[in-house]
Image (cartoon, grey):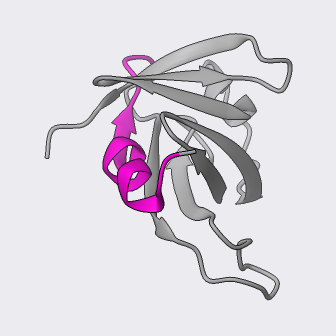
Amino acid sequence: MASDEQTSSILQGRWEAEVPTTAFLEFRGPAPVGGLLGGKPGEGVLSGSDGCNGVGGWYAPDGETATIRRGLSTLKACPGVDTWLSKASSVRADGTVLHVYDGTGEEIGVLTRAES
């Protein structure tokens, strides 16, 4: 398992989709621990959008990978928008590409690291 410092440099930041162009995930530093909206020890804060609805939660980093634990999200109707990113359960970074997997371990899409 990588240290939190190593993982932070690999996953932290904003990752964006090509389609829909408004879809993204942003991985931030350590989550506050405990409470209704708090994370667990070792987790970071996750936010983003599936192109229509906002998504939030936490991620548990392990090297180039992370498991996603969903938190609050909006639930608007999204006619014509592919909301694949709302099904994200885990991710794996490969350079500037972030592979996104659903709960069965199947790759459902990719995101690209945003320019700083």
| Closer to the camera in the image, 79 or 36 | 36
The residue nearer to you, when weighing 80 against 74, is 74
Query: Against 78, is 58 above or below?
Result: below
Give the x, y percent position of residue 56.
63, 58
**Residue 41 is drawn in which quadrant?**
bottom right
Does any portion of residue 55 appear in the rendered image?
no
Name the residue located 82 percent from the left edge and 83 percent from the top edge.
36
Q: In which quarter of the view is residue 11 placed?
A: top left
Quarter of the view holding residue 46: bottom right
User: What quarter of the picture does the N terminus occupy?
Assistant: top right
- Left or right placement of residue 75 versus residue 47 in this view: right
Q: Is residue 39 visible?
A: yes
Q: Residue at x 28, y 24 (%)?
A: 96
Extreme residue toward the left, this view? 116
Q: Is residue 7 magenta?
A: yes
Taking depth in this image into account, of 4 and 86 the one nearest to the observer is 4
Seen in the picture, residue 66 relative to 43 is either above or below; the reply is above
65 relative to 48, above or below = above
Question: Residue 95 placed where, x, y %?
Answer: 30, 23
Q: Which segment is the magenta one?
A: 2-19
Residue at the image position 78 percent from the left and 17 percent from the top: 105
Q: Residue 58's x, y, as percent?
A: 65, 59
**Is residue 40 rendered magenta in the image?**
no
